[in-house]
Every structure is written in C-alpha cells, then in structure tokens.
Image: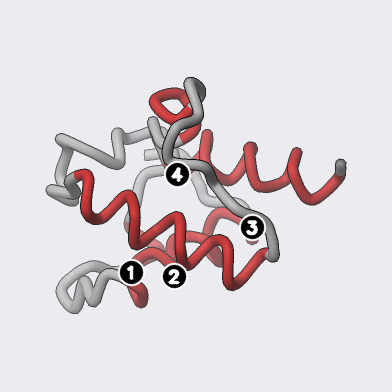
Amino acid sequence: MAEQTAEQHELAALIVASLNLEDVDPAKIDPDAPLFGGELGLDSIDALEIALAVSKHYGFALRSDSPDNQRVFASLRSLCDHIGQQRAA
C-alpha cells in the first residue's frame, strides 16, 4: 500500500465520516485502490454522498453528469488530485 499524503488522509477521513464507515480506518485506505467495487464496497449512492461532502468541505461542485467522473472517482489519489486541480483554478 502506498503512503497517504496529508491531503489524501484528510479526504479519506471526510469520506469515512460522510458515509458513516464506522469499521474503516481512514489511514488504511490505499490511495491507489478502487473506491468503487473494491474493499470499501461503495456504490453510486455513495458517490453522490461523497460529491456532496466534497462540495461542502472544499467549496466547489462535482457534477454528476461529468464525463470525467469515472476517472475522478477511480481512487482516493485521483479524487484528491482532482480536488487539488479545482482548488488551484
């Protein structure tokens, strides 16, 4: 498992809190593991919850109709990278 950056850990903690994943340690989420269909067992409803939490916490919206969503939500690393790019823009 790759080490999480501080930004990835913050995002992992946000995901765990917003989805009430009581048995998941944010520090143990592999930044490169799939968010959906992997160990976390997340589904499309969870994606909406994550998008809402990201919107509230980081101040920009993740659009449900974006053609980039599959890439953006692929892993903790890809979501964190996308957030970083949006915040820098």
Q: Which residue is mark 2?
A: 13
Judging from the image, what secondary structure is the residue with disc 2 in? helix
Q: Earlier in the sequence, mark 3 or mark 4?
A: 3
Q: Is 25 located above or below residue 5 in the figure?
A: below
Q: Which residue is mark 1?
A: 16
Contact, mark 3 vs mark 4 (Cβ under 8 Å): no
Q: CA distance from mark 3 to mark 4?
A: 10 Å
Instruction: Answer left or right for 4 relative to 34.
Output: right
The amino acid at mark 1 is Val
Instruction: Answer left or right for 75 relative to 42.
Output: right
Q: CA distance from mark 4 to mark 2?
A: 11 Å
The amino acid at mark 4 is Leu
* Quadrant in the picture for residue 32: top left
Q: Earlier in the sequence, mark 3 or mark 1?
A: 3
Q: Which residue is mark 4?
A: 76
Crowding at label 2, few (<14), some or many (≥20) Cα neighbours within 10 Å? some
